[in-house]
Image (tube, rainbow, N blue to C red):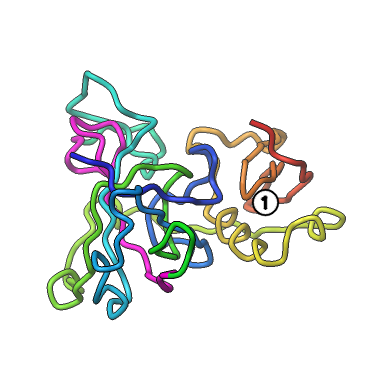
Amino acid sequence: MKIIARIQSDFPTKFGIPRQSGRVEELTARIVFEPEYRVREAVKGLEDFSHIWLIWEFSEAVRESWSPTVRPPRLGGNERMGVFATRSPFRPNALGLSSVKLEHIELDSQNGPVLVVSGADLMDGTPIYDIKPYIPAADCHPEATGGFAQKVEQRFLKVEIPEPWNSMIPEEKLQALKGVLREDPRPAYQKDPERVYGMPFAGMDIHFRVRDEVLTVCGVTEYKK
């Protein structure tokens, strides 16, 4: 398969990326086509669709071997499930599937056409193999059941960003950051209330701790690779 595009997102590493697409609608990203596919005709008609499917590669999880069972974070990493009953990146073929909202298409961009999307769960630079329109009549199933993922209680953290950290975060990134943090980006097995975590996001390193379901940002510094 050929890589047709790569995504530009606010996540230079895997840590903090929402566990599913569409979870944090405030997150925006840009899909930049490889030079061979920067053709306007290739996206003709796509502007009429509100959402699209992305087929991409878990580029940080490519490996020769595979396991028939994995430990889903949704279950706290303590229980094994069949790999095909999960969306784990550790699969025979490291392919991901995401449904994202198509905000608009930049036709006149230097690298155009560029797709601007929201709700993406991809790390910056992730290779994309295909883009398909989301068709509600075929792709939406309100009666569908969600297996073990549906049985786990959904929870959100309360997010507090006191000064001076709040004013150090660009206004256009603040709501997206809060959306990511309220999802609790920590690994499921780490619950130490004294531990300070660091999450790279939009050129910043966001430092925080979590205690009694409250996430408090305690530092903002420049992200350095």
Find residue 196 and report its horizontal and vertical position in percent: 71, 35
State the residue position of label 1. Answer: 215
Region rendered in magenta: 82-107
Kindly indicate the quadrant of the structure image that contains residue 195. top right
The amino acid beneath tag 1 is: Leu
Residue depicted at 65% across the width and 61% down the height: 173
Q: Where residue 58 appears, x then y in whole percent?
A: 33, 37
Q: Horizontal and vertical percent for residue 37?
A: 28, 53
* Residue lying farthest to the right in this orientation: 164
Secondary structure under tag 1 reads strand
Whether 112 is among the magenta residues is no
Drawn side of residue 154 relative to residue 224, left or right: left
Residue at 18% in and 35% down:
82
Query: Is residue 98 shown left or right of residue 66?
Result: right
Instruction: Say whether residue 102 is magenta.
Output: yes
Q: Residue at (22%, 68%) from the top-left corner? A: 133
Q: Is residue 26 left or right of residue 90?
A: right
